[in-house]
Image: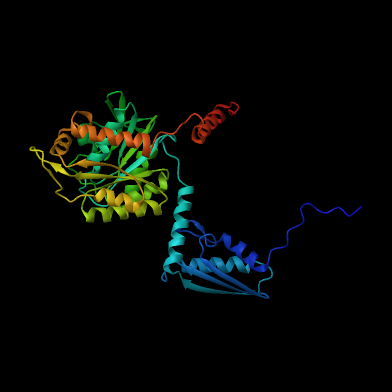
Amino acid sequence: MSPRSDANPPSSPPTREEEVRQSLRAVIDPELGDTIVDLGMVRSISVAGGRVVVDVALTIAACPLRSQIERDVRGQVEALDWVETVEIRIATMDAEERAAVMARARWKAREDAPETAVPTTARVLAIASGKGGVGKSSVTVNLAVALAQRGLTVGVLDADIWGFSVPRLLGMEGGVEARLGKMVPLEKRIGTGLVRVLSMGFLADEDQAIMWRGLVLNRAVQQFLQDAHWGDLDYLLIDLPPGTGDVQMGLARMLPRTEMLLVTTPPLAAQKVAARAADMARKGYLRVAGVIENMSDFTCEHGTTYALFGSGGGTRLAHGLGVPLIGSIPLHPDLAAAGDAGTPVAGGQGELAAVFAELARVVAEEVAPLLETSSCSARLIERVKAAVASGDTPPD
């Protein structure tokens, strides 16, 4: 009989280079929140006897954390009992390496996203634009109303902290109440559906300047997401401020399942800045779900149509991004007049109401249909959490 072979032969011991690399996993870049190994900052490791040389690439030459990282690297490597000397060679990343590091850092932030009060079954759609003045808030409000008319419950988070206009556009006013230390969104019944709204417009006067920046802005949006009783929602629409600033980056971290709808107008300049907003979304691992063109052709009372701002801009942007053009909204004076009156056109009759009804249909049936929750993992996780909290046996 032949000798019995070991089904799981012992693995070979790690090389000294592997030992050094493993020790360097304890060195964390505090700004990026990950190990310098996983971030790709360790370019090479060479070992000759007890001498170790480590090549570390920093994101910028004048990195303020250089001394700390160098000190931590030296400490970790010198802790290996066979190491006699350590040489650390510092270099600066090229553009490709830097892009890879930032991509890894954004993915890390996405994985560590905090819990929010937004139900896991809700589709979260951020309405974005690269620039102001394209009618993004009007699109948000009327899309919310059109979705609610389909019998859905729609949350609207007015994340345009500086330029909030959602309350006026919806004709809503009043103070935000607190329940058990959390904000209660104001509600408006639309047909058989419901719209729930949170906005700085309920907390500050419309003529009052909000002079906040950076972390304070992010904290305000975080409170709207975490410290609020949103209840059951089918959709949450987030009216973003224009551009690619702090709020957009914070949203990617706080609610990484957000999907982006880009609003543009026909001119080429609007498409270019909207494309930058799309690029930022994708770098934050957010899905760009589609494009909406606003202020397209104008038809006068005699029936003649004019492309006052050009034509085809939405189509070109959608094609360039590889996403669908959800719809085009004609330039019509009723849209602005209805917004000023607080009576969204999507809640009435006529051409514009039909346009937004079709937008809502495309969103709800094609672009971002509601998830089947009876067997999805999100609902299963919720049931397991509820069972554990109550002490019951988790469901099969």
Q: Position of residue 257 (x, y in %)?
A: 42, 43
- Who's the residue at 52% across and 34% down the image? 381
**What residue is shown at x 43% (from left), y 69% (from top)?**
94
Closest to the observer, 341 or 362: 362
Please say whether residue 64 is visible from this viewpoint.
no
Count of marks placed on residues: 0
Q: Quadrant of the C terminus?
A: top right
Outermost residue toward the right? Answer: 1
Relative to 388, say whether 34 is above or below. below
Residue 147 point in image, percent of width and height = 31, 32
Residue 187, image x, y percentages: 29, 28
Q: Residue 174 sits in which quadrant?
A: top left
Rendered image quadrant of residue 333 = top left
Q: Residue furthest left?
A: 302
Q: What residue lies at 40% left-to-right and 36% top-to-bottom?
A: 118
Q: Is 97 situated left or right of 262 in this image?
A: right
341 versus 107 height, above or below: above
Figure check: 311 above or below 338:
below
Residue 25, compared with residue 156, is above or below; it is: below
Q: On the picture, is 256 further left or further right than 302?
A: right
> Between residues 243 and 361, which one lies in front from this camera angle?
361
How far from the left and from the top, in percent, is residue 137? 24, 41
Q: Is residue 89 left or right of residue 243?
A: right
Residue 234 appears in the rendering: yes
